[in-house]
Image (cartoon, rainbow, N blue to C red):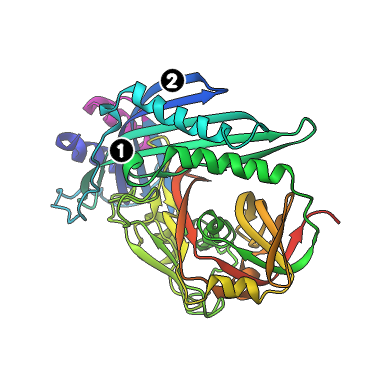
Amino acid sequence: MKEYARDVLDAALATGGDFAEIFYEDQRTNSLQLMGGKVELINSGRMHGAGIRVFQGLNAIYAYTNDTDREGLLRCAQQVASAVQSQRRGVLRAKGFGVAELPPPHVYRLWPSQVETRRKLDYLRAADAAARSVSPEIEQVSCSLLDSEQDVAIANSDGLYVEDTRVRTRLACVAIASDGKEKQQGYEAPGALMGYELFTARVDAEKIGRDAGESARLMLHAPECPAGVMPVVIDNGFGGVIFHEACGHSLEATSVAFGISEFSGKLGQQIAASCVTAVDDGTLPNEWGSLRVDDEGMPTTRLVLIENGMLKNYMIDKLGGKRMGMEPTGSGRRQGYANAPTSRMRNTYIAAGMDDEREMIATMGDGLYAKKLGGGSVDPATGSFNFSVSEGYLVKDGRITTPVRGASLIGKGADVLMQIDRVGREMRMAQGMCGSISGSVPVNVGQPMIRVKRMTVGGRA
């Protein structure tokens, strides 16, 4: 694409646009699923195309095509240009491409295309057998494996041209336990910006299956959680989804730039307890949400969002930065070439603190220990959220006692940040997919164990 990218950018600018960009993608994916111990799905796909974006002031026009030869991209660029209504005298032209200074590429040791399907199925069968071995009450297990190899090229009228390759692999296991009357589910889904070295470096397929099965079995026999306002300890790993959803989205330019975030205009102000430092880091080696460059071609960054309770930064894409009068932070992301980018999280976590995890349980009195969180929802404008607790335990007099099910955590992001009074020493991350206006993208969420002094817990009245 590089040899004709400038011609395409010039065509996109021909009617008076301020800035033009091309995002080219070629992605190969494989998905496999084992259901009930039998192979349910083996599927391969390829997504190929390019999107062209033009800015005119604070407006953006976007179109995409899967015809990526010179003539196809020129036609797409002309369609975008035809939507520009400009009073500009004279037409801008794309600058010559310079040499981009990029961070080192991520290392992939065992590419998905090099791994036989038989070997991939072995990982699924190992997870399936381990989940079933937990208990006769495990009546159904579904295991899936997804891998992708994505090549991208990004060019813009400011003279940027970069290429990158992203490889991701993820295993998921769902176990369902039943006593003939009720059912409960356990779920584990680790992944990384890696090839199949994932299974020698980070992930034990059998352990993933056992953990999913054990969680389902445990919750099947747990009583309903009582509702009320109480102290809540949230464990590390996927517990970090509460920061991601309740606070992270409200720190993206997607909402901040329009003044519809609860944190708009609060840079330099205290928005969290002084024990809280939160980071969004796209540079971590081979992490699920990491990128060498974002989907606007910028090198990704380690961005401190909150430092000792003070709001330090927002996550900003190029168009959001124009609206805010601020520089982009390498946070522009999109699902694929059919999506225009916007500001998104990468690996977002509360940083490790200094508190002893046993002490925070021992001194909390009566409350809830949320070991694993499930799905939830949030309104970025208000920060109001509601999250399910997929595995929880009552705490009595500072001791973890009865497992409980049906719990939910309810509140506002700004309130929860101020109510955190303990932050543990061991930060751990977990993997998920985040949906927003630029599609679904892989993200890590994480935190150490944290304690919230007072929180509304939904459950049995």
Q: Are marks 1 and 2 in contact (CB under 8 Å)?
A: no
Give 74 or 426, whichever is nearer the viewer.
Answer: 426
Give 117 or 444, whichever is nearer the viewer.
Answer: 117
Tag 2 residue: 42
Q: Position of residue 325 (x, y in %)?
A: 40, 67
| Picture quadrant of residue 48 | top left
The correct choice, above or below, for 433 with respect to 324 in the image is: above
- Tell me which segment is drawn in magenta: 65-81
The image quadrant where one finds the N terminus is: top left
Q: CA distance from mark 1 to mark 2?
A: 18 Å
Using the image, tell me which numbered label, if any, was put on residue 457: none
Q: Position of residue 426 (x, y in %)?
A: 46, 66
Give 211 or 105, whichever is nearer the viewer.
Answer: 211
| Residue at the image point whose x is 48% and y is 55% from the top | 445
Tell me the element at label 1: loop
76 falls in the magenta region: yes
Q: Position of residue 230 (x, y in %)?
A: 74, 69
Tell me the element at label 2: strand
| Residue at the image point whose x is 44% and y is 50% from the top | 342
Q: Is 214 on the left or on the right of 230, as rendered?
A: left
Q: Is 146 on the left or on the right of 379, as rendered?
A: left
Question: Farthest residue toward the right?
Answer: 461
Q: Is residue 83 visible?
A: no
* Secondary structure predominantly adopted by residues drawn in magenta: helix
Q: Is 425 on the left or on the right of 182, as rendered?
A: left
Question: What is the three-letter code of the residue carrying label 1?
Answer: Gly
Question: What is the three-letter code of the residue carrying label 2?
Answer: Ile
Tag 1 residue: 195
